[in-house]
Image (cartoon, rainbow, N blue to C red):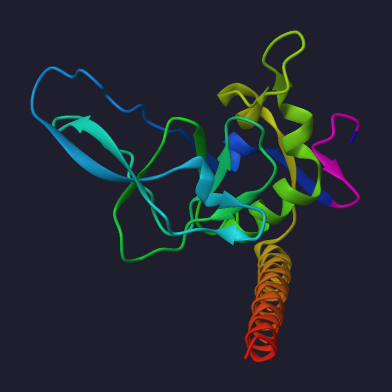
């Protein structure tokens, strides 16, 4: 079809048609009423090698409707988006901070790991982010652009296969980074021991 809804036998849908898009919440510095501190996912936790569990805090009024993160939520940064992560921490109840967007896939329609794979590997994030001002190095994603972004939507079985492959590649990248760091620690340890031996 010419309108791009079906291409190469793969249906195309806007993200808003197959996932709920949830903006992050602001920290309330001078709220009226009782406030509580909530655990929060911050932009620094959204890294190319995966989700980092170093939570921040957000102050919110108790009566607020809280958009707590759920396992399977896909998170991207609002500013300078360069990767996507899937929230998988079952041990914490956390809010997304204001500089994040959360996409909650509709079950059985969109696999979260597939969505993260597509967002990272199709240049969608760079296409929908725009510079925040003349001469600015900061690019910004808007709610509307994210919702209206089209993605290919193959059958859920195929999505899960691609999502699983993406998870494996992420794990390999993480292990490679850890191995390089361990090699560096080992070399420093050998160097320190040799230096101490020579000074005896």
Q: Residue at x 33, y 39 (%)?
A: 67
Q: Nearer the viewer, residue 138 or 148?
A: 138
Outermost left residue: 34
From the image, which quarter does the N terminus lie in?
top right
Residue 45 magenta: no
Outermost top residue: 134
Based on the displayed image, in which of its 4 quarters is residue 26 positioned? top left
Q: Residue at x 67, y 72 (%)?
A: 181
33 up-or-down from 87: above or below: above
Outermost front residue: 200
Q: Residue at x 65, y 60 (%)?
A: 49
Left or right position of 190 against 63: right
Based on the displayed image, in which of its 4 quarters is residue 82 positioned? top right
Q: Residue at x 71, y 61 (%)?
A: 155
From the image, which quarter does the C terminus lie in?
bottom right
What is the chief secondary structure element of the magenta stretch? loop
Q: Nearer the viewer, residue 7 or 135?
A: 135
Task: Tell me, yes or no, if residue 65 can be seen here.
Answer: no
Q: Nearer the viewer, residue 152 or 141?
A: 141
Q: Position of residue 167 (x, y in %)?
A: 66, 69
Left or right position of 141 against 7: left
Task: Tell me, yes or no, if residue 12 can be seen here.
Answer: yes
Residue range (magenta):
2-9
Q: Position of residue 111 (x, y in %)?
A: 60, 59
């Amino acid at each position: 079809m010419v309108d791009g809804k079906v291409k190469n036998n793969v249906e195309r849908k806007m993200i808003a048609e197959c996932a709920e898009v949830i903006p992050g919440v602001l920290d309330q510095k001078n709220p009226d009423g009782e406030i509580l501190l909530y655990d929060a996912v911050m932009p620094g936790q959204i890294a190319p090698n995966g989700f980092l569990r170093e939570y921040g805090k957000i102050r919110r009024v108790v009566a607020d409707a809280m958009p707590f993160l759920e396992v399977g939520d896909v998170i991207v940064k609002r500013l300078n988006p360069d990767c996507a992560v899937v929230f998988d921490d079952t041990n914490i109840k956390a809010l997304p901070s204001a500089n994040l967007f959360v996409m909650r896939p509709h079950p059985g329609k969109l696999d979260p790991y597939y969505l993260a794979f597509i967002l990272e590997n199709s240049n969608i994030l760079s296409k929908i982010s725009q510079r925040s001002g003349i001469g600015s190095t900061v690019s910004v994603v808007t709610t509307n652009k994210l919702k209206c972004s089209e993605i290919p939507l193959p059958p859920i079985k195929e999505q899960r296969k691609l999502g699983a492959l993406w998870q494996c590649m992420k794990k390999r990248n993480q292990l490679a980074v850890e191995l390089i760091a361990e090699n560096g620690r080992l070399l420093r340890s050998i160097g320190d021991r040799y230096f101490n031996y020579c000074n005896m």
